[in-house]
Image (cartoon, rainbow, N blue to C red):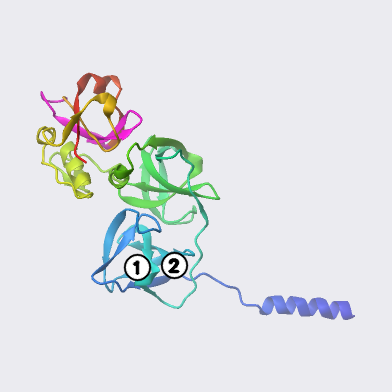
């Protein structure tokens, strides 16, 4: 009888313990005039957008360093908790992140293998909201990987999560440490469509893209590819370093197309298919290579 009473008491105790649920919550920006939404939880990472003071953001999670994973204006990133007033409601802890392994000085990109596309989601779960559909064979910039084989990636200016089951990894060698910020910015714009005369995230042409990326690192470039070919110093193909401008003679004589070298014989540029990575040594580009300039 004592055992029965003890068992009943244990069951009643378990039932009496309230379940802890992770309620959705919002945070209000207190920084003046704005708070930077960053690509990951560190002040050294790329800024996705500036969130004005008193703006409310949707809080997804919080890590152990007082950084919040939030959504603002359709973008997901990280903000410092020092400048965020959060309502008193439980916030789910962030899934521990294991950095994607790469050699020293290397960036990692992933190539989508899902057909016809792979969903970029707000968090690392198939039930999470879809931010964008990434077409097959598109390259994305990999930020990190969690223990459940989900990758935190950047595509077309948006940061989210994709299943590692449909992503093929490939490191990109970065040969100059001072090119890190510029390359992160350049790679984050993959998938932005080509627009003749375009100079913004809504669409770029080749020189509009390079001008936009370099401006983000505090470097002013002329508007056209032929004008950009006259700035900086000339470098040979064998001397190329990440962040150098590479030029091609395509639709017109001279430097009529430009991109940014990212190492490993590859460059990123706004082509007819949008911002994408191409092989410098492919027959098309090898036959049209015009030269390179270093402006950093």
Extent of the magenta region: 250-275
Whether 258 is drawn above or below 62: the answer is above
Q: Is residue 269 magenta?
A: yes
* Residue 34 can be seen in this image: yes
Q: Is residue 92 left or right of residue 57?
A: right
**Mark 2 sits on what residue?**
66
Q: Position of residue 155 (x, y in %)?
A: 34, 46
Q: Nearer the viewer, residue 14 or 170?
A: 170
Q: Nearer the viewer, residue 206 or 255?
A: 255
Residue at image coords 36%, 48%: 154
Q: Nearer the viewer, residue 272 or 61?
A: 61
**Label 1: element kind:** strand
Residue at image coords 11%, 41%: 223
10 Å crowding of disc 2: few (<14), some (14-19), many (20+) = few
The N terminus: image quadrant: bottom right
Q: Position of residue 188 (x, y in %)?
A: 31, 46
Q: Is residue 226 left or right of residue 16?
A: left
Q: Earlier in the sequence, mark 2 or mark 1?
A: 1
Q: Position of residue 70 (x, y in %)?
A: 38, 63
* Residue 113 can be seen in this image: no
Q: Nearer the viewer, mark 2 or mark 1?
A: 2
**Label 2: element kind:** loop
Residue at image coords 25%, 25%: 237
The C terminus: image quadrant: top left
Q: Nearer the viewer, residue 229 or 254?
A: 229
Mark sitting on residue 57: 1
Q: Are marks 2 and 1 in contact (CB under 8 Å)?
A: no
User: Residue 286 sits in which quadrant?
Assistant: top left
Q: Is residue 123 left or right of residue 44?
A: right
Q: Is residue 294 magenta?
A: no
- In space, the residues marked 2 and 1 are separated at their CA atoms by 16 Å
Whether 68 is drawn above or below 184: the answer is below
């Amino acid at each position: 009888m004592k055992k029965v009473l003890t068992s009943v008491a244990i069951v009643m105790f378990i039932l009496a313990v309230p379940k802890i649920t992770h309620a959705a919550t919002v945070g209000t920006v207190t920084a003046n005039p704005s708070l930077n939404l960053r690509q990951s939880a560190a002040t050294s990472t790329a800024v996705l957008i500036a969130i004005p003071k008193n703006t409310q953001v949707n809080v997804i999670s919080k890590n152990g360093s007082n950084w919040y994973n939030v959504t603002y204006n359709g973008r997901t990133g990280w903000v410092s908790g020092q400048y965020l007033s959060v309502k008193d409601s439980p916030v789910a802890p962030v899934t521990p992140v294991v950095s994607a392994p790469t050699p020293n000085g290397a960036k990692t990109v992933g190539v989508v293998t899902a057909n016809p596309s792979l969903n970029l989601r707000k968090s690392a779960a198939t039930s999470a909201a879809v931010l964008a559909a990434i077409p097959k064979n598109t390259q994305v910039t990999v930020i990190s990987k969690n223990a459940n084989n989900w990758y935190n990636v950047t595509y077309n200016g948006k940061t989210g999560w994709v299943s590692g089951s449909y992503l093929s990894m490939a490191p990109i060698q970065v040969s100059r440490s001072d090119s890190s910020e510029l390359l992160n910015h350049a790679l984050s714009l993959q998938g932005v469509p080509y627009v003749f005369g375009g100079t913004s995230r809504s669409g770029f042409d080749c020189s509009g893209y390079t001008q936009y990326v370099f401006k983000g690192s505090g470097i002013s470039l002329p508007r056209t590819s032929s004008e950009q070919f006259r700035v900086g110093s000339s470098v040979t193909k064998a001397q190329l370093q990440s962040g150098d401008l590479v030029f091609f003679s395509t639709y017109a004589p001279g430097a009529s197309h430009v991109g940014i070298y990212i190492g490993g014989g590859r460059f990123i540029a706004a082509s007819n298919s949008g911002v994408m990575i191409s092989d410098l040594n492919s027959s098309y580009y090898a036959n049209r290579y015009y030269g390179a300039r270093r402006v950093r």
